[in-house]
Amino acid sequence: MNQNRTQALEVNDPFGKASTGKLGMWLFIIIDGLSFAGLIIAGVALRASSEYWPMAGEVLNIPLTAFNTFLLICTSFTMVIALNCIQKGDQSGLKRFLGLTMIGGMIFLGIQTYEYSHFIKVGFFPSTSIYAAIFYITTCFHGLHVLSGVIYIACILRMASLNAYSADNWDHVEILGLFWHFVDLVWILVFTIIYLI
Amino acid sequence: MDYHKTIYIKNAVYLAVLTILEVGVSYLDISKTGQIGVLLSLAVIKMLLVAMIYMHLRYETKTLKWILFLPILAGLYFAFGVIYDLPFRWVV
């Protein structure tokens, strides 16, 4: 009786085989995405009502940030390969690619810090103009997400070093991957709107 | 090499090429409206590639896809509302 009931639930489940943890992460992504949308919409509205707005590349360093964007894309790739490895039971592959993803995230943060330090040296503070305020608030909010992601990867990497994951148990790695790819996905929009347009 | 790895590698290459294209377009001397249209289109394509391939959204059920898609419409609605309101905001 119970077995039949379980089968019926699996067939009719509107979320397929997605675990509750994964659904929770998707819900978090929706809410977090709307937070970013709020910042970006506010930025666009302030820009539209502003008389002067610098051209792309006039203040911000596009080549350096394009490299950072490329780096984040590479970390998305290493993250998905890490998941692919553990789905096949490859423990060392999981650790290697998670480690590479974490290093990529740290380099991204390092470059962003370098960019901020350069701007502060030349007197480009958040209080300098509305443009500066939008730039710092949006990129800093994203940077905090990258930092959270790096800490999150470190936690999962610690669990992986204890061989907590296997070919039958990789849900945590998939959920971490969703968060990390979301951070990459948001950066694509932030890079386009803040740096290129 | 297995099928999934090949797709992931191809996706990374597409994303890198689209990023280079985006940077190139930002330096082009074309109309601002056209430039914004091209840049936003490229960004949407890149975001879809990340969501569909890396986040495995294409394997999820229709219900989950709809739940994720509807807030995007809400975001666009708010964006439209704010931007539509701009010309009237500073009128005293």
Image (cartoon, rainbow, N blue to C red):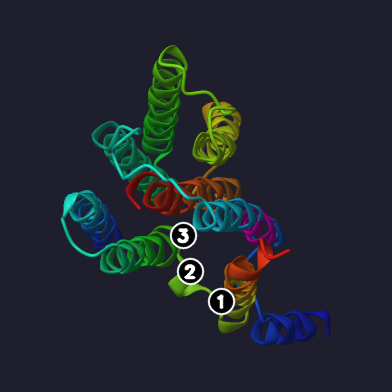
What label sits on residue B55 in the rendered view? 3
Precedes in sequence: disc 1 or disc 3: 3
**Residue at the (27%, 55%) spot, across then down:** B15
Contact? badges 3 and 2 (CB < 8 Å): yes
Viewer-proximal residue, B77 or B21?
A: B77
Chain to which mark 2 belongs: B
Q: Are marks 1 and 3 on the same chain?
A: yes
What label sits on residue B65 in the rendered view? 1
Residue B6 position within the rendered picture, expressed as x and y whole percent measured from the top left? 22, 58
Q: Amino acid at mark 3?
A: Met
Residue A164 position within the rendered picture, expressed as x and y whole percent measured from the top left? 59, 36
Q: CA distance from mark 2 to mark 1?
A: 7 Å
Viewer-proximal residue, A139 or A154?
A: A139
Residue A169 position within the rendered picture, expressed as x and y whole percent measured from the top left? 57, 50
Contact? badges 2 and 1 (CB < 8 Å): yes
Viewer-proximal residue, A23 or A188?
A: A188
Q: Quadrant of residue B14?
A: bottom left
Q: Which residues are magenta?
A: A26-34
What label sits on residue B57 in the rendered view? 2
Label 1 crowd (10 A; few <14 / some 14-19 / many >=20): some
**Residue at the (61%, 50%) spot, across then down:** A39
Q: CA distance from mark 3 to mark 2?
A: 5 Å
- SS for callout 2: helix
Contact? badges 1 and 3 (CB < 8 Å): no
- SS for callout 3: loop
Chain to which mark 1 belongs: B
Q: Is residue A165 left or right of residue B45?
A: right
Main structural element of the magenta stretch: helix, strand or loop?
helix
Q: Residue furthest right?
A: A1
Q: Is residue B49 above or below residue A156?
A: below
Q: Is residue A185 above or below residue B80?
A: above
Tell me if residue A27 is in the magenta stretch. Answer: yes
